[in-house]
Image (cartoon, grey):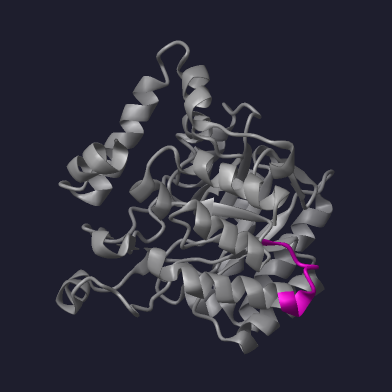
Amino acid sequence: MYKALIRPLLFLFDAEQIHHLIVKLVKSLALIPGFKQIAGFFFRYSGSKLTTTLAGLEFKNKVGLAAGFDKNAEIYRQFASFGFSFIEIGTVTPLPQPGNQKPRLFRLPKDRALINRMGFNNKGVAYAVNQLKKRDHSVIIGGNIGKNTETTDEKASDDYVKCFNALYDDVDYLTVNVSCPNIAGLEKLQDRDSLKEILHRIMEERNKKNFRKPVFLKISPDLSFQHIDEIIALCHEEGVDGIIATNTTTKRENLVTPDSRVKEIGQGGLSGAPLKNQVLQVISYICKQTNNTLPVIGSGGVLTPEDAVDLIKAGASLVQVYTGFIYEGPFLAKRINKALEKYLIHP
């Protein structure tokens, strides 16, 4: 019903406006007594084979909601009912910022893809922390952190440390996002020296805490294997707990959407089905290079249960969805978990 009736109607309107409308709708529905139980009955799926321990955290299943959907930690409680075992909020920055000029979110229906240039629009880390004070613990929460657009690269580590310390007590893990293509110059922070400073300072802060929480690094799919090797070495050196592979891509290869439309949209990160092969290559490479000693969370290109199985086969321990949720609807996590359980029982 979603793809036949609801999605065509939603796709008649601006993508970002519809996102906000859906968020408001789900928040309103969640006020109805019994919503959580009813939604859980329809959308959740669990099984002993799906339970996954990663970096000291126990995930009830292998499917999470990627960063970007709940930028301000406003809807994680409601969306936990859609079958996700973990939800990553953010990207959050120290100060609120409006992001890039609208329109900045575009659909490519023929490719089952999105292009976005949101630009870390969020209400700031203090707002997110206040929202997280209201959380229950039915779902694992990750905090995706970045820098403000106006912060220079030389001062970038200060922003990451501020967000890290502010969120630390209220999330279960943290993700260092240095790979979003929609912040000018952010990709430079993936260079070894810049990344080393950020990770080293964050790990110094973690060492001061009374309890240890996992730190993941989210990387670009557009990196060369040599660059990935440098990042792997740095992760081992600094004690990073795992890699999220990957963010969106700046490439526009093998798209069905006419070039004229793609050029009209312009810059931004591409997500969705066209990203899958890049993601698989990155996951496979990291797992082989590290002999599976550095955990990987697969993110990108998961539109179907079969896509998720492919990422797990490549070596990912968990998967995240975003664009797939928009194209496939609220049953996606359940469908993926069913397929993954079947694969894990009969590989």
Q: Position of residue 177 (x, y in %)?
A: 55, 63
Residue at the image position 20 percent from the left and 45 percent from the top: 8
| 268 left or right, relative to 77 | left
Q: Quadrant of residue 123?
A: top left
Residue 153 or 298: which is nearer the viewer? Answer: 298
Residue at the image position 61 percent from the left and 86 percent from the top: 225
Residue at the image position 73 percent from the left and 62 percent from the top: 295
Where 37 falls versus 151 (above or below)?
A: above
Residue 9 or 47: which is nearer the viewer? Answer: 47
Q: Position of residue 322 (x, y in %)?
A: 44, 51
Q: Position of residue 56 (x, y in %)?
A: 80, 47
Magenta includes 192?
no
Residue 283 visible in the displayed image:
yes
Q: Quadrant of the N terminus?
A: top left
Q: How many marks?
A: 0
| 76 left or right, relative to 216 | left
Q: Position of residue 99 (x, y in %)?
A: 34, 57
Residues in magenta, as a range = 288-296
Magenta includes 294?
yes
Q: Quadrant of residue 330?
A: top left
Q: Quadrant of the C terminus?
A: bottom right
Where 41 falls versus 268 (above or below)?
A: above
